[in-house]
Image (cartoon, coloured by chain):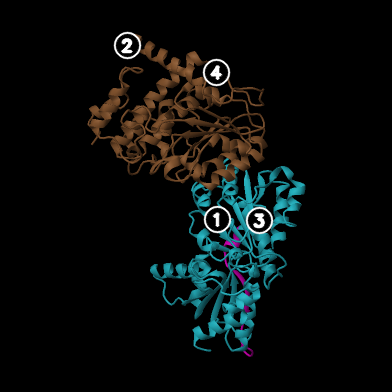
Chain colours: A brown, B cyan
Amino acid sequence: MAEALDRTIEAEEAVATSGAETVAEAPEESSAISVSPWVANSLVPATVDLARRVREDCLAMTSRSGAGHIASALSVVDILAVLYGSIMAVDPTNPDDPTRDRFILSKGHGGSAVYATLAELGFFDKNDLLKNYYANGSSFSGHVSHDVPGVELTTGSLGQGLGVACGIALAARLRAATWRVFCVMGDGECDEGSVWESALMASTQCLDRLTVIVDRNGMQSFGPTDDTALVLGDIAEKFRAFGWKAVDCDGHDHRALATALATPHGGQPLCVVAHTVKGKGVSFMEGDIRWHYDSASPQELGQAFSEFAGQGDGFPAGTAILRSGGVA
Amino acid sequence: MRNTFIAALTERAATDERIMLLTGDLGFRVVERFQERFPGRYLNGGIAEQDLIEVAAGLALEGYKPFVYSIASFPTLRCLEQIRNSVCNPELDVTVICIGGGFAYGQLGMTHHATEDMAAMRSMPCMEVLSPADPAEARAVAAYCFESTSPKYVRINRGGEPELEGAERVEGLPVQGLRGLVERARRAPAGVEGAAGAADVAIVATGAIAKEALEAADLLAQAGISCEVFTAPLVKPLDAEGIRAVAARTKLVATLEEHTVIGGLGSAVAEAIEDARVDGAHGLAPVLRIGIPDRFPDVVGDQRYLRQRFSMDAEGVTRRIREALGRA
């Protein structure tokens, strides 16, 4: 078991090292915002393990409830794991701590991944989530809800999170606060005109407490983003044109994500375009638009979990649910 | 009224440091007084209403009390979903101010008419809808907004409106007193002046068009019809008890608003009376809704002209009421 774990960490570090080179712009100047020094060797395994557990939770939750959007959740999991596992200051025992870093999931349909991340961190009981996600009478709506501890803003209608994040970042500046605001958007979401209103606002107001991460999984409702609807092209370049500091990185490489998120951006908001794979981590879901809509059958769930075997503690979080017959 | 409201806001901002004024690049020669005194709490968010509302929501989440200023249907219909999701759902203390209610910007054309705004705002859960008739009500509405923590929509005509009859009664109202109907005038035909008893018609008006109701009351009295005139500075929550009491003592309740007859004051009054009937009330007067019919103006016109064209001026109101009473 220990050997297997070591091998996993070794493999992850190898990926992480190569991935770091994909960061388009290396840190080059001192910034008004200081990010805790990244301790790659000790933190990568922790966030990787968090990501694995969140993936299992998401698969179990959506399979059990018949909810869609599993592939959208899987693409954003590593971003969340790095943010919550190593970057953001949050306190699960005090979700409203005024000094906390704020997080907004603007691509609200990735909500299962946020709920699972918060549950893994201890914001609320994970079993409650696994049993009640998407269920009548619960707070765990398919798109994130502010009724859930740790969730700042209900979202689901695309293009609406970034503006609120701007308002929060403006409040931070007015109060000379040290906390930061992180906002995750989808790439398809960048079709929305309101995104670009807010992008202008953020750079005009020099909102350097604000970081946006675009989950660039390249897919939207009908298929590849740039083939089926509007051509998004180089999203980082667009944000740069709107006055932002913007970098690209591998959105599944934890060290690359952490490095990108540490990019100095004094006086400017930061955009990290995280290149991801929709459905990441489950071979038969990766890049298949079907999993924007469908949920895994019990058989497919078992197959997905088998792909995680040997990673982490080797005891998939959803196993208990499967054994208890909770999956229809 | 716009200057009255902004003057009150500026004065209040001196003691309430949470107050912020956000404009969508409108309010030339109106908002400067606030900007000059409180530059740090003034923000021109540009011609970007969707973002403006989101930024206000973010500021309110962090404890600020933002007022968003714009004209026509720009701060309501353009960003209706942002108001719904990010302001009303979390019940944030955001006040949306619209200048140009009804046909105030008449000749500019239909894009600059705010004629469906109250219907849209009324339908938003938790949203309060305020519509002052004269400067006295504008001051009272401002005072109400300073106390209320609900999402609020304030619909203001424009500038230069006179104080209407009964303004002194508004001045004397406590803040919560604004929730009631404001008794403005009572007219009886010559010879029966001072006689007690029910008026033939009660006109309930909201906004600056109440001026036409007061003039209509004179014309009705000349035609032998007694009349009471009320203003409703709060369209939501409407003073349902007051409406019920008025409807119980008159032959006809006529509503007057510079707004489509669908979904505004007239609808609210009719709903209140129908609710009372469901509760078992008998003998309540029918409701004549006077407002803009279900179509756009087909010609150019100033406010006075368009009111006349849609039979919403004093003569038109008089004619409609006489027809409804069978005394044409």
In the rendered image, which residue does mark 1 sit on? B78
Picture coordinates of residue B70, whole percent (x, y)? 64, 56
| Cβ atoms under marks 2 and 3 closer than 8 Å | no
> Which amino acid lies under the numbered mark 4 shown in the image of this protein?
Trp
Q: Position of residue B311 (x, y in %)?
A: 57, 79
On whether disc 1 and disc 3 are found on a single subunit, the reply is: yes
Q: State the residue position of label 2.
A: A1
Label 2 – label 3 distance at C-alpha: 68 Å
In the image, A301: left or right of A234?
left
- Distance (Cα) linking label 2 and label 4: 27 Å
Q: Which mark is residue A38?
A: 4
User: How far apart are labels 1 and 2 at the CA level?
Assistant: 58 Å
Which residue occupies the foreground of this view, B311 or B306?
B306
Q: Which labelled disc corresponds to residue B143? A: 3
**Three-letter code, disc 2:** Met
Left or right of A242 in this view: B262: left
- Decide which of tag 1 and tag 3 comes sooner along the chain: 1
